[in-house]
Image (cartoon, rainbow, N blue to C red):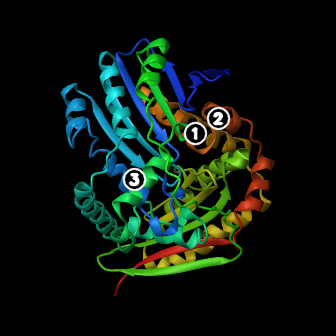
């Protein structure tokens, strides 16, 4: 077993079988969080297997030869714990919060579930209907439908453009043996990190994880491989208009592609620009479009960091008749970014907001475990704690250079939702 030494507040260890263990001891709390991260998200699916990773997340909880369906949940609930799971394009993860005194039972049960999932054929058919119902519900939500349409408009060649939940027609074609193959190929030690944060000391953690995560399934050699190509930057304005019943207000969402983790500093700079443009009443777009002109009911920006690509979006809720004017005014602000210096006061506000958000998001064991695991899947865990320092070092000129490089008013994707007449 080798130990990776760094200034990281947790300890990162790699077991002999290749499994990563991330542990942070917090003696002041009797609670412990166990969060297992797997580099097996929708990004790893062949096109025809779209939705497999998310469907597998459901099927993991259907048990093993030792733990029948529902037994794992019973173990957690009887000890007052909370468990859940999530799947994204870059990862799947399974997390439990429990009292520290139950750590051994919890880790052994979770490892059994993840490594030895039986994926029974009878449960496969039943659970597929549950997943299909989730897809139908998302299609009834205007915001979900609009965001997925935007992603398909932005990512025309990359898996990020596909819905994590997949498509109904493709999921109905899937066979249980295909899912077993996907599981046995991706749920292997080199793709996984066990993150444990809370009131359990390191010696106990290492002994327990080494014991629990020892017997991995034999790796499947028949799983289709995915060749992922980088998505090119958008070279024109891609506008799409969708008319929906029962929609009372219009929606405008504009998006720009940024770099992934290979240019992390650039990506963090876009996070700053996102705040500068549309976070808080004093941000540029909120102040003009909502406070001064009343052209929008609400406007905000979001920044999404993913392994291969980041995404900056600006979204507004507004009267449909004002959509073109608001879109034009947003583009005017992007022109201004290229020509007007960002003041020290404005830059300091953006830095303060982001660093405060980071501080508030790293207060609990669950938040810390999630942060470490997320960065394990897209980059490496140590990067997780460098964010505030990197944000603090940005200067106005750097932001203007990034705006010129990534936030062109002539190259973006726009999705417009309109009420059906």
Secondary structure beneath dot 1 equals helix
- Looking at the image, which residue is at 59% across and 69% down? 154
Q: Earlier in the sequence, mark 2 or mark 1?
A: 1
Number of marks drawn:
3
The mark closer to the camera, 3 or 2, is: 3
Q: Answer yes or no: do the residues labelled 3 and 2 have beta carbons within 8 Å? A: no
Task: Where is residue 409? Give x, y as percent.
Answer: 69, 70
Q: Mark 3 points at which residue?
A: 180
Relative to 115, say whether 335 is above or below: below
Mark 2, other Cα within 10 Å: few <14 / some 14–19 / many ≥20: some
Mark 1, other Cα within 10 Å: few <14 / some 14–19 / many ≥20: some
Q: Mark 2 points at which residue?
A: 383
Is residue 399 found left or right of 157 in the rendered image? right
Q: Answer yes or no: do the residues labelled 2 and 1 have beta carbons within 8 Å? A: yes
The quadrant holding residue 106 is: top left
Q: Which of marks 3 and 2 is nearer the N terminus?
A: 3
Q: Is residue 337 visible?
A: no
Task: Where is residue 343? Give x, y as percent.
Answer: 73, 46
In this rendered view, identify the residue nearer to me: 175 or 389: 175
Task: Where is residue 116? Give x, y as percent.
Answer: 36, 40
In this rendered view, identify the residue nearer to me: 300 or 184: 184
Q: Can residue 28 be seen in this view?
A: yes
- Give residue 375's mark: 1
The mark closer to the camera, 1 or 3, is: 3
The quadrant holding residue 395 is: top right
Mark 3, other Cα within 10 Å: few <14 / some 14–19 / many ≥20: some
Mark 1 → mark 3, Cα distance in angstroms: 27 Å
- Looking at the image, which residue is at 69% across and 63% down? 407
Position of the C terminus by quadrant: bottom left
The quadrant holding residue 228 is: bottom right
Mark 3 → mark 2, Cα distance in angstroms: 33 Å
Relative to 294, say whether 309 is above or below: above
């Amino acid at each position: 077993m080798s130990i990776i030494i760094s200034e990281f507040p947790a300890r990162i260890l790699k077991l002999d079988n290749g499994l990563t263990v991330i542990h942070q001891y917090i003696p002041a709390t009797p609670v412990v969080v166990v969060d297992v991260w797997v580099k097996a998200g929708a990004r790893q699916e062949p096109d025809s297997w779209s939705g497999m990773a998310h469907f597998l997340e459901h099927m993991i909880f259907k048990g093993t030869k030792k733990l029948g369906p529902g037994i794992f949940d019973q173990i957690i609930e009887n000890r007052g714990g909370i468990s859940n799971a999530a799947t994204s394009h870059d990862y799947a993860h399974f997390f439990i919060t429990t009292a520290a005194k139950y750590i051994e039972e919890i880790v052994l049960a979770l490892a059994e579930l993840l490594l030895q999932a039986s994926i029974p054929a009878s449960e496969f058919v039943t659970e597929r209907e549950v997943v299909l119902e989730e897809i139908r519900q998302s299609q009834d939500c205007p915001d979900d439908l609009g965001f997925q349409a935007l992603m398909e408009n932005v990512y025309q060649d990359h898996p990020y453009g596909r819905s994590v939940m997949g498509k109904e027609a493709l999921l109905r074609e899937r066979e249980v043996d295909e899912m077993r193959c996907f599981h046995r190929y991706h749920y292997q030690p080199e793709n996984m990190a066990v993150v444990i944060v809370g009131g359990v000391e390191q010696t106990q953690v290492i002994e327990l994880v080494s014991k629990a995560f020892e017997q991995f399934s034999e790796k499947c050699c028949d799983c289709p491989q995915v060749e992922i190509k980088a998505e090119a930057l958008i070279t024109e304005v891609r506008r799409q208009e969708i008319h929906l019943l029962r929609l009372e207000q219009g929606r405008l969402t504009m998006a720009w592609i940024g770099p992934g983790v290979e240019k992390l500093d650039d990506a963090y700079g876009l996070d700053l620009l996102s705040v500068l443009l549309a976070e808080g009443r004093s941000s540029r777009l909120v102040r003009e479009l909502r406070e001064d002109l009343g052209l929008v009911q609400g406007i905000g920006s979001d920044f999404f960091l993913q392994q291969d690509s980041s995404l900056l979006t600006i979204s507004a809720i507004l009267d449909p008749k004002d959509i073109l004017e608001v879109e034009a005014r947003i583009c005017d602000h992007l022109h201004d970014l290229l020509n007007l210096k960002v003041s020290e006061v404005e830059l300091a506000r953006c830095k303060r907001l982001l660093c405060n958000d980071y501080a508030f998001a790293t207060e609990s064991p669950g938040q810390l475990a999630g942060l470490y695991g997320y960065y394990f899947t897209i980059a490496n865990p140590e990067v997780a704690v460098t964010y505030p320092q990197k944000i603090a070092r940005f200067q106005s000129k750097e932001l203007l250079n990034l705006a010129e490089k990534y936030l062109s008013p002539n190259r973006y994707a726009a999705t417009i939702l309109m009420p059906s007449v």
